[in-house]
Image (cartoon, rainbow, N blue to C red):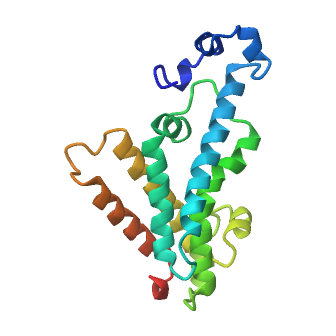
Amino acid sequence: MAAKGASGLSLREVAREMGVVSSALYRYFPTRDDLLTALIVDAYNDVGASAERAAHRVPPSEPRRRFHAAASAIRKWAKTNPNEYALVYGSPVPGYEAPQFTIEPAARVALVLGSIITDAWRESRAEVSEENEASAMKGVLETRNLDAVMPGVPESVRALSLMVWAQIIGCISFELFGHYKGSVRNFNRFFVMVVDEAATLVLPPERV
């Protein structure tokens, strides 16, 4: 996959590299898509576990530090596993459609950031006008799903959380795929700035 990309993955070539007959591999992965799915699920669970461990090491009373820790863990995992990162956050593999059961592992890492934001708002005394919220956000988000994963969080903050998730992944992707060359000299400091601005957008004012 590193040499030819996910779209060039071949069960026969994998079997050849392993020194086994292809029929032996087909017993475990009947098709190339089955192998891709296993790799995708493994990658999502791996990055999710990395973010969870990083967040758990910081007390809940320090949401900004927790937010930075989780985001940094995602970036570190991406730099350590660039091929796996590209598989799950890069271009879709032509002709491949992920099964429904990949949704849960895919959401795992985003839920880490979501839980940090939710915990911070739960402990906060900050208030948002519900009347203005309902008017501005009506029909924008999948409210039922977000009620389950970010209960009690203002709707506008939920929307900002989705924007922030895209911002963090986008920043990592730009660095990993070379789009910041000639623009950013110190990637570590730049990433801290990006995450800090993101945290300011989604954490309650009194906890920032």
| Residue at 60% from the left image edge and 47% from the top image edge | 46
Image: 151 above or below 74: below
Counting from the top left corner in percent of width and height, residue 137 is at 59, 70
The C terminus is located in which quarter? bottom left
| Residue at 57% from the left image edge and 73% from the top image edge | 117
Counting from the top left corner in percent of width and height, residue 132 is at 57, 82
Name of the residue lying farthest toward the right:
27
Name of the residue lying farthest toward the bottom:
125
Image: 105 above or below 206: above
Q: How many marks?
A: 0
Counting from the top left corner in percent of width and height, residue 184 is at 23, 51
Q: In the drawing, does residue 101 fall left or right of residue 13?
A: right
Q: Nearer the viewer, residue 57 or 158?
A: 57
Name of the residue lying farthest toward the front:
19
| Residue at 77% from the left image edge and 23% from the top image edge | 28
Q: In the drawing, does residue 201 fall left or right of residue 28?
A: left
| Residue at 68% from the left image edge and 65% from the top image edge | 146
Image: 70 above or below 32: below
Q: Nearer the viewer, residue 60 or 164?
A: 60
Q: In the drawing, does residue 200 fall left or right of residue 46?
A: left
Q: Quadrant of residue 60?
A: bottom right
Query: Would residue 140 be seen by someone viewing this image from the given angle?
Result: no
Counting from the top left corner in percent of width and height, residue 171 is at 39, 52
Query: Would residue 106 be seen by someone viewing this image from the given angle?
Result: yes
